[in-house]
Amino acid sequence: MAPRQPASPTFLKNPRADIILRSADDVDFYTCRSLLSYASPVFESMFGLPPPVNAEDGDEIKGGRRVIKLAEDSIILERVLLFCYPRNVSVEPVGLQDVATAVMLLSTLDKYDMADSYNCVLGILRTSPLVKDDPLRAFAVACRVKDLHMAKFAARFLTRSKAHQTVDNWNPDYKCFTFFDLLRAEEYRDKCIRALELKDWKKMFPFTAFHKVGPDGEWPYGECDVFWKEAYLNNVADALRVNPCGAVADETELQNPLMGVQCKQCSNIANSLPTLVSAYIERSIAKVELNLGW
C-alpha cells in the first residue's frame, strides 16, 4: 500500500525541500525550513535543536532529510503550512469547511505563534456563516481546545434560542463544557450588549461633515447633512442587540443607507465607515471578560 501524500502538490517530494514534517497520521510534508522559520518562531526554534543521536529517540533521516514528527493531523498541518508559503508559491486556498476544523486551525496557529495567520482565519470566520449558524458547536470546540478568544466570539452569537435549536443535534464536543459555562457565556454576551448600549455613537461618528473646496473647485463644499450615517448606525445598533460583534457592521443588508451617496467626498467616507465601526465595536467589548476557569 502506497504511503499517503499531502493534498497540496506544494508539499510533495521535491529537490528544494530540506526538511520533512510528519503528521500524526503519518503523512510526510516536504518543506523549506527557511520559509517555515520566517513564518513561525516556534518552527525556527524547533529547527535549531540538534537532531537526536539515536533514531529511536525521535527524528529519523529520509532521503538525506531530517524527519520531524508533529502532533497535528495532516488536515490541520497542511493548512498551517500553507500559511507559511508565499501566495505565488502555493495558490491553494486555506479552506474552512466546518467550524471544528476552523477552531482547531486557530488553536494550532496560536501554538506555533503565527499571529498574522491567526488573525487572518479569525477575520474569515467573522464574515463566514460557520460560527453565526452554529455558535454552540463553535463554543464547544473552543472549550475543547481551550481557545478563549474563539469561545468569546462564539458566545456573542449564542442566544438562548440558538442553543435550544442545536442542542438536540448531539455532538461529542458538547461534553467539553458545562451548564455553568453556558450561563457564563450568556452573561458575557449580555455584558457585551450593555457595554455597546452605553456608547455615544453620535459623539464618535458625528452626523455632519465639512468639506473644503476640491482641487478643481468642484461642488459640493461646506457642510453636508450626512443623514445616511445616522440611518446606518441605527441599523448597526439594532443588530448589536442580537449579535454584539464587529462583524455586524459589514453585513450588506445594514449598509443600504450607505448606497448611492451623491457627494463624492461623503461617498468615500461611506465606503470606509463599516470598517471603522467594526473596529470601534471590537475595541468597545475587548475588555469584557469571560471566565471559563481554564
Image: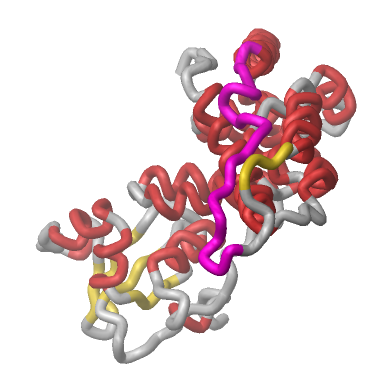
- In the image, residue 46 above or below residue 254: below
Q: Is residue 70 left or right of residue 217?
A: left
Q: Is residue 167 left or right of residue 28?
A: right
> Percent from the top left, x then y, of residue 65?
24, 78
Q: Residue at x 69, y 39 (%)?
A: 249
- Is residue 101 something that shows in the picture? no
Give the residue drawn at x 80%, y 25%: 238
Residue at screen point 82% across, 44% down: 257
Q: Nearer the viewer, residue 27 or 44?
A: 44
Between 14 and 59, the one lying in front of the other is: 14
Residue 203 in magenta?
yes
Q: Quadrant of the N terminus?
A: bottom right
Q: Is residue 131 visible?
A: yes
Above-or-below relation of 97 to 88: above
Residue drawn where x is 51% and y is 13% of the image: 291
Picture coordinates of residue 235 (x, y %)? 80, 32
In the displayed structure image, the side of residue 42 where residue 128 appears, left or right: right
Q: Position of residue 174 (x, y in %)?
A: 70, 27
**Quarter location, residue 193:** top right
Nearer-the-camera pick, 111 or 280 = 280
What is the chief secondary structure element of the magenta stretch?
Answer: loop
**Which quarter of the figure has residue 139?**
top right
Q: Is residue 88 magenta?
A: no
**Residues rendered magenta in the picture:** 198-217
User: Can you give x and y, in whole percent of width and height, for residue 33 in the image?
Assistant: 26, 71
Quarter of the image with the C terminus is: top left
Identify the residue at the far front of this view: 217
